[in-house]
Amino acid sequence: MAKSQQTFNKSEKEKKRLKKREEKRKKMEARKLEKEEKGGESIPFAYVDQFGNLTDTPPDPADKIKVKAKNIVLGVPKKEDVEEEEYDPIRKGKVSYFDNSKGFGFIIDTEDQEKYFCHVSGLIDEIQENDKVQFELEKGNRGMNAVRVKLI
C-alpha cells in the first residue's frame, strides 16, 4: 500500500490558502454592497489647505494663488558670491587643549568663540595649550577642522 503524497503540513497550508481566498471574497462583496448603499461615494477625499494641513472640506477658490510658470525655479539656487574683503580665510584663536601623544586637540576661535578640532597632520608649527595661533577652516567628517595651524 502506497503512502499518501499529501502530508499534514501540506494540507494545513492548503486550508490556510483557501481560508484567505474566502475572506478576500467576503471583503470584496462587503465593499460592493457598501458602494451600492452610498450611491458610489465610497472613496473619501482629503484636501490640503493653504498651511499644508489635511482637511475634509475643499479649499476656497478665492484663496487660490496664481503662480506664473516662468517664476518657478527648478534646481539648487545659485550661491551668492562673497567678496574677498568680507571673508578672511585666515582666523585667529587660542589652543584650549592639545595632546601630543594622541596627536589632536581643540582651538577656540577668538571671533565667535567656536571650538574647532585640530589634528597633528594639520599643523605647521608645534603647538601647546594656551598658545595663540592662526589657522584656516576645512570641512571634515564631523564638522569644521582647523588646518594649516601656526603660531602667531
Image (cartoon, grey):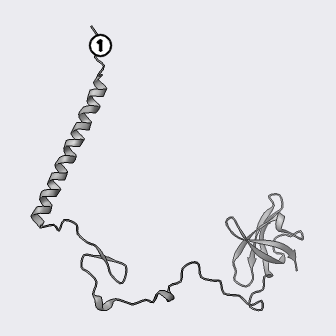
Q: Residue at the far right: name it.
A: 125
Quadrant location of the C terminus in the rendered image = bottom right
User: x and y percent of residue 78 in the render?
Assistant: 63, 83
Q: Residue at x 75, y 87 (%)?
A: 87
The quarter of the displayed image where residue 137 is located:
bottom right
Left or right placement of residue 120 versus residue 57 in this view: right
Per the image, label 1 sits on a secondary structure element best described as loop
Callout 1 crowding tier (Cα within 10 Å): few <14, some 14–19, many ≥20: few
Q: Residue at the far top: name it.
A: 1
For residue 88, above or below residue 14: below
Q: Nearer the viewer, residue 16 or 117?
A: 16
Q: Residue at x 19, y 47 (%)?
A: 25
Q: Nearer the viewer, residue 53 or 138?
A: 53
User: x and y percent of residue 85 in the render?
Assistant: 77, 92
The quarter of the displayed image where residue 54 is located:
bottom left
Left or right placement of residue 145 versus residue 72 in this view: right
The residue type indicated by label 1 comes to Lys
Q: Nearer the viewer, residue 41 or 90?
A: 41
Residue highlighted by disc 1: 3
User: x and y percent of residue 111 in the render?
Assistant: 73, 85
Quadrant location of the N terminus in the rendered image = top left
For residue 60, above or below residue 41: below
Q: Residue at x 66, y 87 (%)?
A: 80
Left or right placement of residue 138 versus residue 23 in this view: right
User: x and y percent of residue 17 in the render?
Assistant: 26, 37
